[in-house]
Image: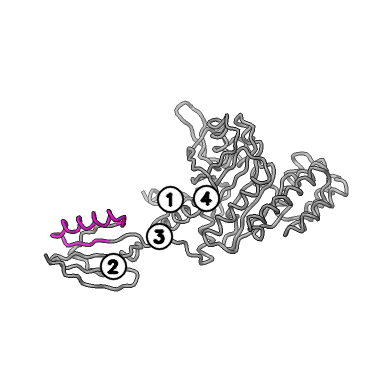
Amino acid sequence: MEKLLHTPEGVRDIYNVECGKKLALENRLKKTLHLFGYHDIQTPTFEYFDVFRKEIGTIPSKDLYKFFDKEGNTLVLRPDITPSIARVAATLFGEEDLPIRLCYTGNTFINHSNNQGRLREVTQMGAELIGDDSVEADAEMLAMVIESMQAIGLKEFQLSVGHLGFFQSLIEDATLDEEARERVVELINNRNYFGVEEYLDSIMVKRSSKEAFAALGNLVGGVEVLAKAKNIAPNSSGIMAVKRLEKIYDILELYGVEKFVTFDLSMTGNYGYYTGIIFRGYTFGTGDAVVKGGRYDHLLEKFGKTSASIGFAIVIDELMNALIRQKIRIVYTRKNAIILYDESRARDAIRLAKDFRAKAKNTELIKKSPEKGLEDYIRFGKEYYAGSLVYIKKSGEITMVNLVTGEQKEVNNNK
């Protein structure tokens, strides 16, 4: 029984003010996505295993929550919502050849092998622009992320942008096989550039390639790093990738959000399905990225539709932590009015509650216990974020309490 009273490791209950603030935050972010013309979509919490199989490139199979249906099919709780959207876009919007803008909010589930206190269930809110391979689409996504962060009052926010095409050009020039690529990616993700050099030495990679990989650590910063990157790019695909980033920057200037962007040409992408630009959003108060995104031009092909696409996900739980630590107020209004009544005044209380609700006031009805004083209910109201309390006494007199200021006044309503 003791075990049933606790949640499993990696999941938690969210309640009271925190839950209210979380939903208020989601509503504010969603407004920005709607302002950019994105349409809501909901996909199932679990899918067939194949939607998240290894070739899709989300996470390793061992980190999925797997179970079976009655027919013996393997099902998984979604670890990521983008492949589900790709499946929908390929099946339900298969014939559509104009861009489709979709946005969602949903929980994702990852069975982290090494939990390290990380949540296994998190809420993600994201957007996907399907069927548009343009540089304008890339810029729209980045601008929308930045405007979402501004809308919730985040001022210290940085969007780190890279391009897989540039990184891939270095891999190709060094003629690295899959195993070598994985080792190099691991070392670079740990910012261990000396380790990269040592490893490339051990597998006899040519000098120019070694120097290019060693220089990656310096290719982080403002728009000026793009000129350096072009000098290092070993082939035309690398140069094209950097030129695309330059064009994106020009469009971000039109949006007026370029100061929030830094470039990082060492980014390798956390999901295997990314193909073009990749980006992560960072702020103070959390060790992990609060936004993750990128272009995935070949993901829909795995579900039968050829369609270039780009998307991102905001990790709501990480964002909440950051806002709390930065003392940024999440606007969550004191909503409820409490109507407290002595037993003989139920009729008056219900009539008043109906009147309040008709005026769109959230109203909580509480019958007063003879064992409790008014102060107990005032404390309760404050604790549960109510704004006001109206007490209808047996005598018909009314006490009105402003729970924000503590002010009380008596009204004689004895008719």
Where does label 3 land, which residue? 17
Classify 199 as above or below 339: above
Can residue 187 be seen here? The reply is no
- Marks 2 and 3, the one that precedes in the sequence: 3
Whole-angstrom CA distance, mark 2 to mark 3, is 17 Å
Residue at figure coordinates x 41%, y 57% from the top left: 20
Q: The disc labelled 4 sits on which kind of residue?
A: Leu
Tell me, yes or no, whether the two marked residues, 1 and 3, touch with CB atoms within 8 Å: no
Badge 4: few (under 14), some or many (20 or more) residues near its Cα, within 10 Å? few
Secondary structure of residue under mark 3: helix
Task: Pick the residue in front: 63 or 78.
Answer: 78
Where does label 4 land, which residue? 35
Where does label 1 land, which residue? 7
Whole-angstrom CA distance, mark 1 to mark 2, is 31 Å
Q: Is residue 207 left or right of residue 360?
A: right
- Mark 1 vs mark 3: give the one in front: 3
Whole-angstrom CA distance, mark 2 to mark 4, is 40 Å
- Mark 4 vs mark 3: give the one in front: 4
